Image (cartoon, rainbow, N blue to C red):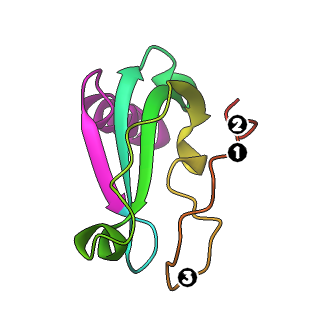
Amino acid sequence: MLTGLITNWRLALRRRRFRVGATLTRFVARDIRRDVEVVDASEIDHGLVTARIRTWNVLYASKKIAPKPNFSEPQRIELKELWQWKGPTWGGPVPPIDSGSGK
């Protein structure tokens, strides 16, 4: 009974956070910021969301070393993979987007 209540509460929070049109932002490394714009959240109960993603180096953009990129094309991605960073922990240049990462 308690686990069902906790599960329902988590799903409600997830639905509120990942609603269509919402833009979520998080630093995934020291100077690397990831912006996620939710396009479709119909599969949120299964841990999937369709989103446009932009990963950029804040320091490089502020020093005009690299421009702030545009959002990618919408891609279906699991929530557990949304904030994973595959580059070095100190940040550095943003690796190119690999098109096979979306599910």
Callout 1: SS: loop
| Whole-percent x, y for residue 86 in the image | 65, 65
Query: On the rendered structure, is 103 left or right of 51?
Result: right
Label whose residue precedes the other's in the sequence (3 or 1): 3
Q: Is the magenta region chiefly helix, strand or loop?
A: helix
Residue identified by numbered label 3: 89
Give the crowd class for mark 3: few <14, some 14-19, many >=20 residues within 10 Å: few
Residue 99 circle label: 2
Q: Under tag 2, what secondary structure? A: loop
> Bounds of the magenta span?
1-26
Which image quarter: residue 51? top left
| Crowdedness near tag 1: few (<14), some (14–19) or many (≥20) residues, C-alpha within 10 Å | few
Contact (CB < 8 A) between labels 1 and 2? yes
Q: Look at 53% across and 71% down and name the residue there.
A: 93
When the figure is inspected, residue 2 is found, relative to residue 37, above or below; the finding is below
Q: Judge depth for marks 3 and 2 and give the one in front.
A: 2
Q: Position of residue 57 (x, y in %)?
A: 39, 68
Spatial CA distance of label 1 from label 2 is 4 Å
Q: Which residue is mark 1?
A: 98
In the rendered image, is residue 78 in sight? yes
